[in-house]
Image (tube, rainbow, N blue to C red):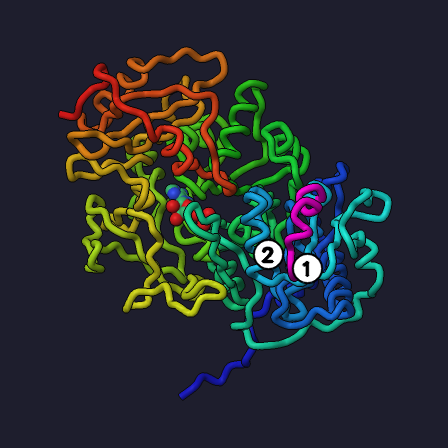
């Protein structure tokens, strides 16, 4: 017997309709790429998204068409999300930090029909335009007054494109499983792969994450998504903040410490989210300028492991609660948050921060398990590690353009991460499966060594890779960027690990570098480090495992 409730498809248009009707005057503040701060309301955002949907329809765009964006977090980028999906189209967020060849590949692979780009990316798009085989029109996200001289053909200013239409447009209505968004994984090996979100997956994912144990967003919040709309769906904030009626602050192209600090303070931000590298820069700026965070209450940190030193700095020095989050593009992207369950309330300081290093427990809509290489489930004892697998309505089952399922026989997706799960349900990532260091038949977690090294006051950033060793197969090599003006040498660094790890985990050597390479999504680029140190051999002074 079926239930007798109304059939109300979970469409993205419902999110902006709700925001505009219930929180119509709530602001969206954007730092424009042109420079000034721009303000509009949810009511404006909805009207302009309707206008855009009408203009796109007049350009011949229809349900199922892919429309690319190369853009920073601004109100215009959000309008694109709502305008494109409101007619049944698919927003395809392209990560501008990818290499030219990858950008060309994914736009052609997605067969995008239009490309909306920020002024910043005009030179990039001019360079690759001759190789884009399906783009019919380019729209630059600015007004006529700021239009640059450009070699792009069939190009128009966004504000002019909007002005061609009014907002007298009705959102299209269709099945909630209709595709809504496309985001390619950064693909460190092989071509990037497209993850195709649906209206239903985006709405369910956002609903699950506004909840108190996760983003904990309400209409009393001012939310600043620093995590880009082009990185894994901006962790749902483009949907979850409007759904909750929160005020939004969009930081545009300026993601350096001083610019973010200025916006956090002047716009009285209460909640923000980004990868650790962004927060390293902010904390460094605060440290140098004796800056304070007077309104910020919560920061979600994920995308790579949040070092304990970072969590303690935010919580103890600045009074900002850290929510360590984990997920991936294939999961829309959030999978777990590390908030404290009642059973764990009252932990002492050390146990609390040890717990906060974990990536946390799954959100409603995500199920997790760890298995061995044969797919057999492993115990949730907090120490056995295995392949982390997930399933749920906002987890991918197949990549765009591929006929093959990516699921195992029980419907789980292998995340490529190696993790433990403890009896309370907290998951802890020990590594990407390809980064784990295999030494004498045992595994060493590169993430744990990095986190420990980051706790040294002279260390700005640290990375650990496995380097070939004739006897032990692989041994850990620690690569360190010192803080400006700090003095730190190999032996001092290694001494810092004493008593904190098993002796055989101790890195065999330390190399100091000026910079550690990062991927397009702000993660340490282990493949580049492995290439850099491909010919490295441990010197005779390097300590041996015991
Ligand atoms: P992406 O699809 O670019 O978001 O990358 C997803 C991958 O980032 C995951 O599979 C993890 O390897 C890594 N990752 C994300 N969040 C965390 C975290 N909190 N701690 C450790 N690794 C993380």
The answer to whether residue 502 is above or below residue 88 is above
- Alpha-carbon distance for marks 2 and 1? 8 Å
Name the residue at 52% across, 68% down: 200
Quadrant that contains the C terminus:
top left
The earlier-in-sequence mark between 2 and 1 is: 2
In terms of secondary structure, what is the magenta stretch mainly? helix
Is 378 in front, or is 387?
A: 387
280 in relation to 232, above or below? above
Q: Is residue 22 visible?
A: no
Q: Secondary structure at mark 1?
A: loop
Asked if the stretch drawn in magenta spans residue 124, the answer is yes
State if disc 1 and disc 2 touch (CB < 8 Å).
yes
Seen at 47% across and 25% down, the residue is 515
Q: Considering the image in quadrants, where does the N terminus appear?
A: bottom left
Read off the residue under disc 2.
Answer: 107
Residue on which disc 1 sits:
135
Nearest to the observer: residue 60 or residue 459: 60
């Amino acid at each position: 017997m079926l239930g007798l409730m109304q059939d109300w498809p979970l469409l993205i248009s419902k999110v902006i309709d709700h925001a505009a009707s219930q929180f119509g005057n709530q602001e969206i503040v954007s730092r424009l790429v042109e420079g000034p701060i721009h303000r509009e309301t949810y009511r404006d955002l909805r009207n302009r998204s309707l206008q855009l949907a009408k203009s796109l329809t007049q350009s011949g765009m229809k349900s199922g068409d892919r429309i690319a964006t190369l853009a920073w977090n601004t109100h215009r980028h959000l309008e694109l999300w709502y305008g494109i999906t409101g007619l049944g189209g698919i927003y395809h967020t392209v990560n501008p930090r990818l290499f030219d060849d990858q950008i060309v590949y994914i736009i052609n692979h997605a067969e995008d029909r239009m490309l909306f780009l920020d002024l910043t990316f005009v030179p990039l798009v001019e360079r690759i335009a001759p190789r884009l085989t399906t783009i019919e029109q380019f729209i630059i996200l600015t007004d006529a007054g700021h239009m640059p001289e450009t070699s792009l053909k069939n190009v128009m200013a966004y504000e002019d494109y909007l002005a061609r239409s009014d907002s007298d447009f009705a959102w299209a209505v269709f099945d909630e499983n209709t595709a809504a968004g496309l985001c390619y994984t950064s693909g460190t090996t092989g071509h990037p792969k497209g993850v195709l979100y649906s209206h239903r997956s985006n709405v369910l994912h956002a609903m699950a994450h506004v909840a108190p144990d996760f983003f904990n967003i309400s209409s009393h919040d001012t939310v600043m998504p620093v995590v880009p709309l082009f990185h894994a769906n901006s962790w749902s904030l483009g949907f979850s903040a409007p759904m909750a009626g929160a005020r939004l602050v969009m930081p545009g192209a300026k993601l350096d410490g001083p610019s973010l600090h200025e916006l956090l303070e002047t716009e009285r931000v209460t909640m923000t989210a980004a990868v650790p590298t962004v927060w390293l820069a902010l904390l460094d700026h605060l440290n140098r300028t004796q800056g304070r965070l007077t309104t910020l209450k919560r920061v979600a940190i994920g995308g790579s492991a949040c070092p304990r030193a970072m969590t303690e700095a935010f919580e103890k020095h600045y009074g900002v609660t850290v929510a360590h989050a984990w997920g991936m593009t294939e999961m829309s992207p959030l999978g777990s948050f590390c908030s404290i369950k009642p059973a764990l309330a009252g932990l002492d300081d050390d146990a609390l921060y040890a717990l906060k290093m974990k990536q946390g427990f799954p959100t409603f809509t995500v199920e997790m398990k760890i298995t061995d290489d044969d797919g057999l489930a492993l115990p949730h004892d907090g120490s056995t590690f295995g392949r982390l697998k997930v399933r749920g309505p906002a987890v991918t089952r197949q990549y765009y353009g591929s006929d093959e399922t990516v699921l195992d026989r029980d419907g789980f997706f292998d995340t490529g991460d190696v993790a433990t799960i403890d009896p309370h349900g907290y998951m802890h990532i020990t590594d990407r499966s390809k980064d784990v260091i295999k030494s004498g038949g045992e595994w060493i977690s590169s993430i744990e060594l990095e986190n420990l090294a980051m706790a040294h006051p002279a260390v700005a950033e640290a990375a650990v890779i496995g380097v070939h060793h004739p006897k032990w197969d692989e041994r850990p090599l620690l690569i360190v960027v010192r803080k400006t003006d700090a003095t730190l040498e190999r032996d001092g660094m290694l001494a810092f690990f004493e008593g904190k790890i098993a002796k055989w985990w101790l890195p065999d050597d330390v190399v100091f570098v000026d910079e550690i390479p990062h991927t397009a999504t702000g993660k340490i680029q282990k493949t580049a480090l492995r290439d850099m140190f491909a010919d490295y051999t441990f010197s005779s002074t390097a300590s041996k495992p015991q």
